[in-house]
Each structure stands twice: as C-alpha cells, then as structure tokens.
Image (cartoon, helix red, strand yellow):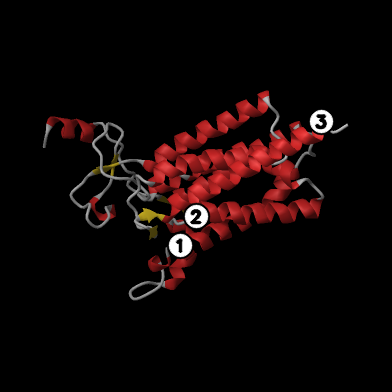
Amino acid sequence: MTMSSAAGLVTSIPSPSTGVWEIGPFPLRAYALGIIVGALLAIWIGERRLQARGGREGAISDIAIWAIPFGIVGARIYHVATDPELYFGEGRRAIEALYIWNGGLGIWGAIAGGALGVWIACRRYDISFLAVADALAPGLLVAQAVGRIGNYFNSELFGRPTDLPWALEIAPQNRPDGYEQFATFHPTFLYEMIWNLAAAALIVAIDRRVRLTGGRAFALYVMLYTAGRFWIEQLRIDTANELLGIRLNVFTSVIVFLGALAYFLLARRRERTSAETP
C-alpha cells in the first residue's frame, strides 16, 4: 500500500455498523428517520415562508397530510419502474418492492407524486398552488439533504473509487460487482447533501432580494437540484438503467432542468407584462 493510499484510509469516512436500532420491540431505521425529520423541516420552513407571504397559519401542515404519502408512493413507483430488475425475475422477490425501509426512492417520482398531493390539497383548501410551491421550495431541498443520511446508513448510492481524504469506506459485502478490490469511494450522498443545503440558502437569499412568485421559486429549486444531480449522478456506480451508455437520470436531469428554466423565464415575462399593463 502506498503512503498516499494509507493516508486516504486513515482520513476516510467510516461507514456505520448498522442502520437499524432496536428500541424494545420496535426497529428504528435511519432511512425512515431521515425521511421523517426531513419532512418535518420542510413543513416548518414552508409554514414560515407561506405565512410571510400572507398565507394562513397551519396551511402547509394541512397540505402535507396529502403531499407526503403521495410523494412516498410516487418515489417508490418511479424507483421500481426504472429498476424493475431489482424486484422481478428469477431469484427476486416481488414483495420487496414494498420494502421502502431498505432504500429505493426516486426523487422524480417523489416530486411528481408530492406535487399531485399538493395540488389536490390546494384545491380542497382553496389555496394558491403556485404560492405553496414557492413557499416549499427551499424546505424541499433541506428535506432531500437530510434524507440522504439514510443512504449513508444503508451503505448505498456511493460513487466511484477514490482515495481522497473524505472518501467513504465501504464494507466488502456492500461493494458492487467489479469493485471488490476497492475500499473507499466517493460519498455522493454527502456531495448531494452539501449541494442541496447550499441551493436552499441561495433560493432564500435571492427571494429576499427579488420576490420570487408565480412558481418561480419552485422552478429555481428544480433547476438548482437537477444541475447538481447532473454531475453527481455521473459519479455513481450503483446499478441503473442507461441510454446510449449514459445513466437515465442524467438525461432526466437535463430534460427537467430545461423545462424548469423555460417555465421560470415565461413566468418572469408574464409577471413583467402584468406589471406594465395599466
């Protein structure tokens, strides 16, 4: 082992020994805990932002009752639909498609499902869907950042091998086929956590200087997230469907980014036109 490799091992990030703690008869799973804490933070941030925009107290909490289950179901459906080989076929157990505590939630499905839940709730409570989306934008990024902690405890979704000082140690049983000889990998979950928190702070800062309305804060959230996902996704080595030798989520990031950018520009133009109309 070279000196640089030894230094990398010494300064690397250790993987946790377990992601489940037994509290009496109940298992406390880090993955589920991350989702719950993230959701609570998103609700709290969204409540404060919506009230600052004139919304009623408790509106986000009411909407969350619809958004969270829709988001989780959508996230799982997307994951299973894009990686069916993990659950169906010879040697697989289809019932495990329901085991969300073992990991496997697709962010694109979460956004789509959660948005549907929010839309239904907004119609039910007679609240502006776009105002709610703008209020939720930075909190969603915080929630996603916290949720990535579950990937750490599950020893999943890490990146290519590396000997950087912040490399993540992965136990032999959790290393993908073809990478058994490597001990440390890019902690892509950590990269995404940092990116998401920085993006959330940027949205809040911009919104304080230039009020983002009409869904523009949410569009900015989508653009910032997909920009980060674009490069982080290309570091990952977990099994994923590909198109032209490129991971499918890379194409998805580009398409969703362009769609959000188009909406942001159109919403801005519409706002200017409304302001100029006597």
Q: CA distance from mark 3 to mark 2?
A: 42 Å
- Could you tell me if the residues under marks 2 and 1 are in contact, i.e. CB atoms within 8 Å? yes
> Looking at numbered disc 2 in the image, what kind of residue is underneath it?
Gly
Q: Which mark is residue 259?
A: none
Q: Quadrant of the C terminus?
A: top right
Q: Quadrant of the N terminus?
A: top left
Relative to residue 166, is residue 30 depicted above or below?
Answer: below
Disc 3 residue crowd, few under 14, some 14–19, many 20+, Cα 10 Å: few
Q: Is residue 120 left or right of residue 7?
A: right
For image coordinates 43% across by 58% down, the residue present is 102
Q: Which mark is residue 276?
A: 3
In the rendered image, the residue lying farthest to the left is 1
Residue 62, horizontal then vertical, whole percent = 73, 49
Q: List the residue tagged with mark 1.
A: 82
Q: Which mark is residue 106?
A: 2
Mark nearest the camera among 3 and 1 is: 3
In the rendered image, the residue lying farthest to the top is 209
- Could you tell me if the residues under marks 3 and 1 are in contact, i.e. CB atoms within 8 Å? no
Image quadrant assignment for residue 89? bottom left
Disc 2 residue crowd, few under 14, some 14–19, many 20+, Cα 10 Å: many
Residue 23 visible in this rendered orientation of the protein: no
> Looking at numbered disc 3 in the image, what kind of residue is underneath it?
Glu
Q: CA distance from mark 2 to mark 1?
A: 9 Å
Relative to residue 83, is residue 119 depicted above or below?
Answer: above
Residue 120, horizontal then vertical, whole percent = 73, 56
Residue 162, horizontal then vertical, whole percent = 25, 39
